[in-house]
Image (tube, grey):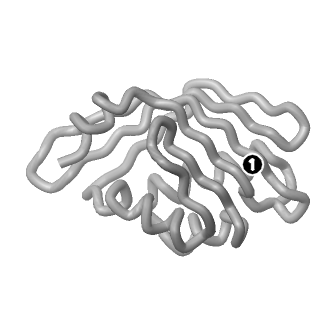
Amino acid sequence: MSDPVAVVEALVAAFNRRDSAAIADLLAEDIVCAGIPLDPAHGRAATMDMLAPFLAAEAVDWRILAIAANDRIVFTERDDRFRFVGQDWTSVRAAGVFEIDGDGRIVAWRDYFDLAELERALP
């Protein structure tokens, strides 16, 4: 998959299915993934470890509100919704920047969000 927008849309769809294998397959081995203001994860395994608490949700419903690309860089505005066992839906607003390599893998992922909003969303 070489269309950068399609790669990011596939990532969101994989999150909504909570499909860890599909998510990992979209990430480059040497990805740098940063949830700003948190420290970045370096590498696919570290990124998957960082994403694990979100994938532990009973249901995930990420919604792309806006998406645009400039060559191999994709910008998103999202509403990332989660429902954890025994809780109602929670939501984190995020702006994401994704850099896609020529093989259709994400080599850099930066999400910008309000840390307090994220902390309220997680159990």
Query: Which element type, helix, strand or loop, lies under badge 1?
Result: helix
Q: Where is residue 6 drawn, in percent x and y?
A: 75, 48
Which residue is found at the position 65% from the left and 56% from the top? Answer: 32
Q: Which of 60 and 46 is in front in this view?
A: 46
State left or right for residue 32 relative to residue 41: right
Q: Where is residue 85 drawn, in percent x and y?
A: 15, 55
Please, what is the three-letter code of the amino acid marked with disc 1?
Answer: Ala
Q: How many labels does the image show?
A: 1
Q: Nearer the viewer, residue 48 or 1?
A: 48
* Residue at the outermost front position: 39
State left or right for residue 3 relative to residue 97: right
State left or right for residue 92 relative to residue 86: right
Query: Quadrant of the image for the N terminus?
Result: bottom right
Q: Quadrant of residue 103?
A: bottom right
Q: Relative to 36, is 28 above or below?
A: below
Q: Mark 1 points at which residue?
A: 6
Which residue is found at the position 70% from the left and 51% from the top? Answer: 108
